Amino acid sequence: MTVSPVGQLVQRGIDVELMSRSLGFAALATLTLVPLLLLIAAVDPGSGLGAGQWLVRVLGVAPSSRRPIADLFGSPAEALRRTTAFGFVGLAVFGLSFGSALQTGYEKAWSLPAAKWRSAWRHVMWLAVFIAFLILAIKLDGHSQTDAEQTLAGIGELVLSLIFFLWSQRFLTNGRVRWRALLPSSVATAIGLLGLHIFSSLVFSPLIASNAVTYGPFGTVLVIQSWLVGVGFVVYGGVLVGRVFHEHTTAARVRRDS
């Protein structure tokens, strides 16, 4: 019996434990991304990469909801003064674990055997490129003022995301999947993140304001954690969507040529 693309997608999501991986993604992102953004903002105040600034932009937060996020993360300079050597070591460990978790997720999504320990250097390289990707994306968004500039910036960020996730899959899987097969996954991930941004501006932004009043800072944390779970779901789910799409188009092409 032939399984539909939707059925295949659901089964692959179950096989790779998509929701569990998304929860793990959110946990590692919290331990890596937020401290990293705070440190970058402290070293380069003009970067626009403070954790609060970055979350305001990617969540599409309305002005009325920005104060709870700013209060939650505080001053980047203060965070740098209070960061100990142990904090830097922890950031490095969790940062490398972030890349390792993403690599494992990609390998599971593409049904690849686990890479050998010698590939650990790739996690360091991926983290460095990830930081550069964040800086470029925020710089691109920060220079847009008019509606036309914002539209161009949005297109630029979409293309940048596509390139980054295309490279990430190829790099972290050690070139074991062809570029042609990876392209649909990268397109699905980039479009999914754009859709999540629009959804966040409509749903998460009002929730931040209401939860801050009801639950205080903890309510803001809950909303941000929920958004990070959504990001993980899109990142891993986009790979599954792309793989199913690639397999079905390839099978259709073979039937047509035979």
Image (spheres, helix red, strand yellow):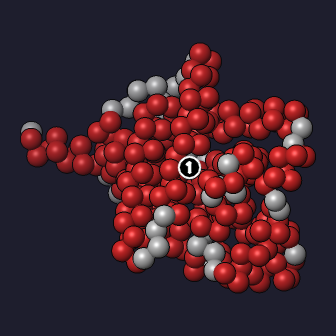
Q: Is residue 98 visible?
A: yes
Q: Is residue 11 left or right of residue 120?
A: left
**For residue 218, what is the image quadrant?**
bottom right
- Residue in view at x 32 percent, y 36 percent: 179
- Residue in view at x 47 percent, y 58 percent: 140
Residue 226 drawn at (x, y percent): 69, 64
Q: Is residue 256 left or right of residue 10?
A: left
In this rendering, the answer to whether 109 lies above or below 225 is above
The residue furthest left is 257
Q: Is residue 214 left or right of residue 225?
A: right
- Residue in view at x 47 percent, y 73 percent: 145
Residue 29 drawn at (x, y percent): 69, 49
In this rendering, the answer to whether 38 lies above or below 112 is below
Q: Is residue 108 visible?
A: no
**Residue 46 or residue 188, whichever sits in front:** 46
The quadrant in which the C terminus is found is: top left
Give the labeled residue for mark 1.
Answer: 135
**Residue 182 or residue 143, whichever sits in front:** 143
Instruction: Tally the marks.
Output: 1
| Mark 1: secondary structure | helix
